[in-house]
């Protein structure tokens, strides 16, 4: 079985971002970048399936500028077998990303596609669902547990009311939530070895997808700031503050 | 511009989020509500009483993303916008539908500047992006908590749709966490507990405070990961987004992924042993103290003050 994993390079999730004063975007120059956390869980899930003898090839693909290589190398160091970089300098919308990935799916014909459920920069939570639609495959988003039995997947997903378990036939698309597994940190020898694994570079412009954005981004602004409050010294004072809020609420 | 809105429901009941979604969608134009469920009748009846609803469409069917997307697709061409809640259902379905229709969706909308101009948070709410959508069809999800609900008092006609879609994925089991606390994402008061609550029993203390205040109970991811609270209690970037009038955070540090979920809270009150934790610094009222001492005292004080709100 072949697994395709899509990964994204994003501003590291521990970095507190700064919105550019001119409203054109978020400052990314000189900011630490890393693999989107949810994508790490997707890679880990694929590696675990391979380790369990249930998958024989893991192909990892990422879309972005040249330096997106580094997250592909991270995935290769975690245990993926080969990488594909779809090189694009401009910012791409999620639909375009999904269309580019669909082209790679056409070529690779994977049995299972794993992605992170959302990217922590645009917070979109679109690409897995879109790719499933474009490739006519069933989807299981927000997965916290995956069991593979032959060509049937049993996926437990985290939903608003709790959890639910789906059964889906391969080929299928699954997006990973944080509780799916604990991603490994690749040991140094694996990091060295990753450099010798095959990594193909493709130009996004050559894949036959229109890269023009559909939406017009007008402005990026910081959220309204909260003003700092006060500190109280006793539980009685705190209770009085709670009571005051409740009374104000009831008065409305 | 007419809008098709997928009604949010759970366990045979119309969810309180739907009235908020109608409020958002009606800013774009007349709203038709679509109810898809295995047993939709009672849900549709409740939906028809919401004001600002022009018509309720009812389809009997499965709730998998594939099935819902196909049902929505079969109706989409009659509308200029197809929308849903930015919930686990809407997140599952709208992007799938969007790709099929070759439309870039706009999701997690928190403000509507014009029928084709929307604001949504990015970077865990640390920035707000405003976009204009020039496409002929708008595929949208709204954050229910960002909108005030429409009133009841409507009486929209109900129309049944033929629905015969099938899905490759099949629902095997639903694991619902039983609780009688108010819906987290639309509650007026929410009490949140962090990993420092220490155990599932500890969370019963938080729930007790919740009962006194008629509040919903939430948790940090760390608390959920530790198994102290169920996953559907998680508040944050990757959990539920809440916008209560009052949020009481108990033993929560205030990591940016948690703050992403509570930015819409009108007032934040916090209890923590560490006065320097980020959440204590931005709380409207902060009390330094050990939650195991403070919370029982707080419940007693509130009782003394006669504060007691019925649940729901
Ligand atoms: C990709 C990603 C997504 C995430 N999504 C979310 C999300 O959606 N929601 C979320 O919440 N987190 C999320 N997280 C995790 C987040 O980064 C934090 O780890 C988490 O919110 C911390 O939870 P906490 O405040 O319970 O624990 P801690 O950060 O460990 O804080 C515990 C707090 O309790 C206080 N304390 C200790 N003992 C007591 C006591 N006896 N009485 C009172 N106070 C006490 C401490 O002073 C401290 O402030 C995410 C992380 C990642 C990487």
Image (tube, coloured by chain):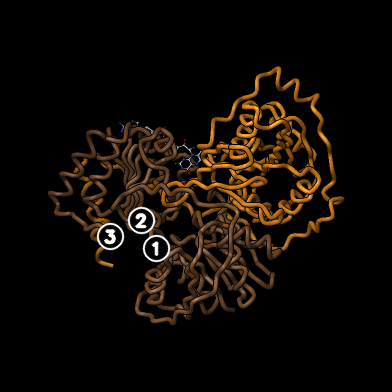
Chain colours: A orange, B brown
Disc with the residue nearer the chain's start (2 vs 1)? 1
Disc with the residue nearer the chain's start (1 vs 3)? 1
Q: Chain of mark 3?
A: B
Label 3: element kind: loop
x and y, in percent, of residue B128 in the image: 57, 56
Residue B86 vertical position relative to residue A198 in the rendered view, above or below: below
Most extreme residue toward the front is A150
Q: Nearer the viewer, residue A150 or B248?
A: A150
* Count of residue discs: 3
Residue that numbered label 2 is attached to: B183
Determine which of the numbered discs, if any, sits on residue A140 in the image: none
Residue that numbered label 1 is attached to: B15
Q: Report whether residue A143 is seen.
A: yes
Tell me the distance, in whole angstroms, between the alpha carbons under discs 2 and 1: 9 Å
Q: Residue at x 62, y 75 (%)?
A: B80
Label 2: element kind: loop
B169 vs B21, left or right, is right
Residue B288 vertical position relative to residue B213 in the rendered view, above or below: above
Determine which of the numbered discs, if any, sits on residue B312 in the image: 3
Q: Are marks 2 and 1 in contact (CB under 8 Å)?
A: yes
- Mark 3: give few (<14), some (14-19) or many (20+) Cα within 10 Å: few
Disc with the residue nearer the chain's start (3 vs 2)? 2
Foreground: disc 2 or disc 1: 1
Q: Nearer the viewer, residue A14 or B96?
A: B96
């Amino acid at each position: 079985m072949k697994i395709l994993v899509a990964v994204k390079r994003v501003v590291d999730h521990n970095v507190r971002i700064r919105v550019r004063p001119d409203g054109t975007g978020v400052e990314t120059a000189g900011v630490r970048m890393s693999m989107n956390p949810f994508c790490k869980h997707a890679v880990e899930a694929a590696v675990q399936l391979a380790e369990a003898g249930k998958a024989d090839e893991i192909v990892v693909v990422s879309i972005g500028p040249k330096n997106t290589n580094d997250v592909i190398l991270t995935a290769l160091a975690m245990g993926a077998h080969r990488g594909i970089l779809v090189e694009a300098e401009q910012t791409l919308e999620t639909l375009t990303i999904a269309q580019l990935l669909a082209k790679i799916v056409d070529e690779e014909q994977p049995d299972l596609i794993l992605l992170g459920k959302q990217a922590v920069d645009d917070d979109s939570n679109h690409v897995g669902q879109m790719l499933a639609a474009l490739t006519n495959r069933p989807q299981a988003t927000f997965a916290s547990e995956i069991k593979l039995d032959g060509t049937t997947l049993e996926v437990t997903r985290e939903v608003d009311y709790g959890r639910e378990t789906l059964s889906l036939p391969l080929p299928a698309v699954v997006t990973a939530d944080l509780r799916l597994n604990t991603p490994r940190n690749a040991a140094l020898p694996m990091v060295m070895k990753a450099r010798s694994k095959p990594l193909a570079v493709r130009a996004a412009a050559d894949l036959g997808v229109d890269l023009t954005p559909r939406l017009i981004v007008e402005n990026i602004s910081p959220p309204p700031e909260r003003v700092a409050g006060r500190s109280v010294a006793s539980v009685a004072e705190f209770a009085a503050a709670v009571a005051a809020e409740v009374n104000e609420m009831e008065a409305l | 511009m007419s809008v098709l809105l997928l009604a949010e429901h759970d366990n045979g009941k119309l969810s309180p989020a739907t009235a908020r979604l109608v409020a958002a969608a009606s800013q774009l134009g007349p709203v038709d509500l679509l109810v898809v469920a295995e047993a939709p009748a009672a849900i549709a009846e409740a939906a028809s009483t919401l004001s600002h609803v022009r018509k309720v469409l009812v389809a009997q069917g499965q709730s998998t993303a594939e099935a819902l997307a196909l049902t929505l697709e079969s109706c989409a061409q009659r509308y200029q916008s197809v929308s849903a809640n930015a919930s686990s259902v809407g997140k599952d379905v709208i992007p799938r539908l969007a790709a099929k229709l070759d439309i870039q969706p706009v999701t997690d909308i928190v403000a509507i500047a014009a029928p084709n101009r929307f604001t949504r948070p990015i970077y865990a709410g640390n920035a707000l992006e405003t976009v204009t959508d020039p496409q002929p069809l708008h595929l949208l999800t709204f954050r229910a908590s960002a909108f005030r609900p429409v009133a009841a008092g409507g009486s929209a006609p109900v129309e049944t749709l033929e629905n015969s879609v099938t899905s490759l994925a099949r629902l095997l089991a639903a694991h619902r966490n039983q609780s009688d606390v108010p819906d987290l994402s639309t509650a007026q008061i929410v009490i949140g507990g962090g990993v420092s609550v220490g155990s599932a029993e500890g969370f019963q203390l938080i729930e007790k405070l919740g009962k006194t205040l008629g509040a919903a109970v939430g948790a940090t991811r760390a608390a959920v990961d530790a198994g102290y609270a169920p996953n559907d209690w998680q508040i944050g970037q990757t959990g539920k987004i809440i916008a209560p009038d009052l949020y009481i955070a108990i033993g929560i540090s205030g990591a940016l992924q948690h703050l992403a979920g509570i930015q819409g809270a009108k007032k934040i009150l916090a209890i923590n042993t560490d006065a320097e934790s980020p959440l204590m610094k931005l709380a409207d009222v902060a009390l330094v103290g050990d939650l195991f001492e403070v919370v029982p005292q707080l419940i007693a004080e509130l009782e003394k003050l006669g504060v007691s709100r019925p649940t729901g």
